[in-house]
Image (spheres, rainbow, N blue to C red):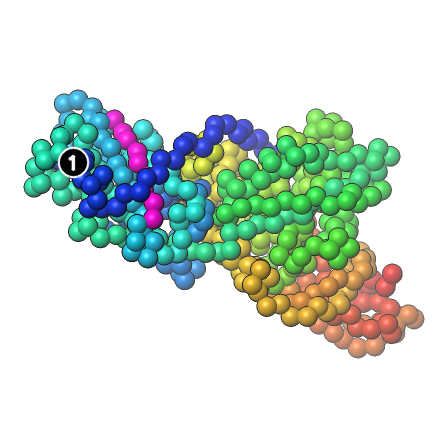
Amino acid sequence: MRPVLALLLAGCQPPVVRFDCAHGEPLCESRELAEGVDITAVYLYQAVEIPLMEGGALVEQDPDDDLTDPPVVAGRDAMVRVFLDPGELDAPRELEGKLTLFEGGSFSTGVEASVSLAGESDPTDLGTTLNFEVPGDAITPDTSWMVSVYDPALAPGEADRSLTAGAEWPDDGSSAALGAVDNGGLLRIFIIPIEYDGDGSGRLPDTSDEQIATFEQYFYKEYPVVRVEFEVGEPYAWNGTVDNYGSGWDTLLGTVSNLRDDYGVDDDVYIYGLFDPAESSAAYGGGVAGLSNMAMSASDAGSRASIGVGFPDWAPETMIHEVGHAHGRSHSPGCGAAGEDPSYPNDEGLIDWRGYDLFSGALKETDSYYDFMSYCSPYWVSGFTYEALATRIQQVDELYGQHARTPPPRTWVAVLLRSDGGAEWIGERTVRREPGPRTVPVTLLDEDGRELGEAKGWYAPFDHVPAGILSLPDPGPAVAGLRVAGRTAWRR
């Protein structure tokens, strides 16, 4: 669940200069390496800062080391930033740089940049570093890289080779592995527009092309994905009421969560029920803006469902937060968020790695921005959340993606355990894999309420509210009701 935040989008992506030039070719030799300049660090940014080299040493990227460092995502656009120490300067120095990428040892892509340097590079100032914009198609699990710094004021042959050793890295003429991870790279979201008739209005949310494009941009900026695909389904009529104090939210989420089969939505897709419970955000007046399942396991396809208000000024930031819950993310600390993740790196919810916006070209400093899974603003994505999302995206791809081998479908039943202590049988659903580790005992009842035996059910909680969905294999027509934790639901 997320309160209302605001985020302004600005700027555009800078142009990319690409050329066919590898180390040792005539075009490369037409420039002289810079004298007296040391490359001190190289960082890559796809949404968060990822160190590639620091202090002359390669920072190894280990794709099998879970939840330690944010990964470089194969296929995703990036900015590579090179930090320089030019030594003592009497005046600003103009320098040029080249980032060369190799694929399997052969030249792949070259990108150029320039900087006017008055002193050592400042991590908080992009104007003091060489910044290379790298297209996503140049980043693969087999990509390696090297960087060179040139002095355009020197004519060919003028450089003192004894003073240029620090202007290339690696300094032995080799290339360093980038360590990119292929996590599938795809996030698919299916929007169900809720025709809200709780007040007799029959209002539909904004699902125009412009609004969908805004959703895509928000997700691409902060999620570790290569592309985001949205599909908008037919409206679903809802005559219940949902208010800003939280009433009615669990009932609507339970209903939306069980519409996957009705809409023919694939198991790897995230369902999002979008609705306008008032004419505008001002008329709504603040309060609860969204609710989601907490998908504790990648195999729990039924929990890949969330709901949120569709007011254009609230919807994008609400959606990235709620779909984060559907990826299994708890709240990050800060500003009154309940159910905080105890593993989060700090108690304030501040981002733990410097961020970078691929659209606006702006840095996001760790002392100024909060993780988008907190309730604070301004927000960005933390390295902690970014890596966890990348891991879940890869797990879902391996289980349900294009090349995954999925088991045959089975029919299960689902029961909504409401926050008011009641229970409601919400129907059947198709399940191909067991939803995850949270199991509870369920008592099976006949139509007269007599106990027929016990079964094992899987419980998936909602975020923030004491509600969730219980599901289990269909126990057969003789079973008319289920009792769990003192609550009883009867087959509809």
Would residue 353 be counted in the magenta stretch?
Answer: no
Q: Position of residue 159 (x, y in %)?
A: 10, 35
Name the image quarter holding the N terminus.
Answer: top right
Can residue 355 be seen here? The reply is yes
Name the image quarter holding the C terminus.
Answer: bottom right
Q: Residue at x 64, y 53 (%)?
A: 269
Q: Residue at x 65, y 58 (%)?
A: 267
- In the rendered view, does 286 fall on the left or right side of 63? right
Q: Position of residue 425 (x, y in %)?
A: 81, 60
Q: Main secondary structure of the magenta part?
A: strand
Q: Position of residue 122 (x, y in %)?
A: 28, 33
Instruction: Report the span colored magenta.
Output: 108-116
Q: Residue at x 18, y 32 (%)?
A: 151
Q: Is residue 492 above or below residue 5?
A: below
Q: Which residue is mark 1?
A: 32
- In the rendered view, does 64 fall on the left or right side of 102? right
- In the rendered view, does 136 fall on the left or right side of 286? left
Residue type, mark 1 in image = Glu
Can residue 373 be seen here? The reply is no
Q: How many marks?
A: 1
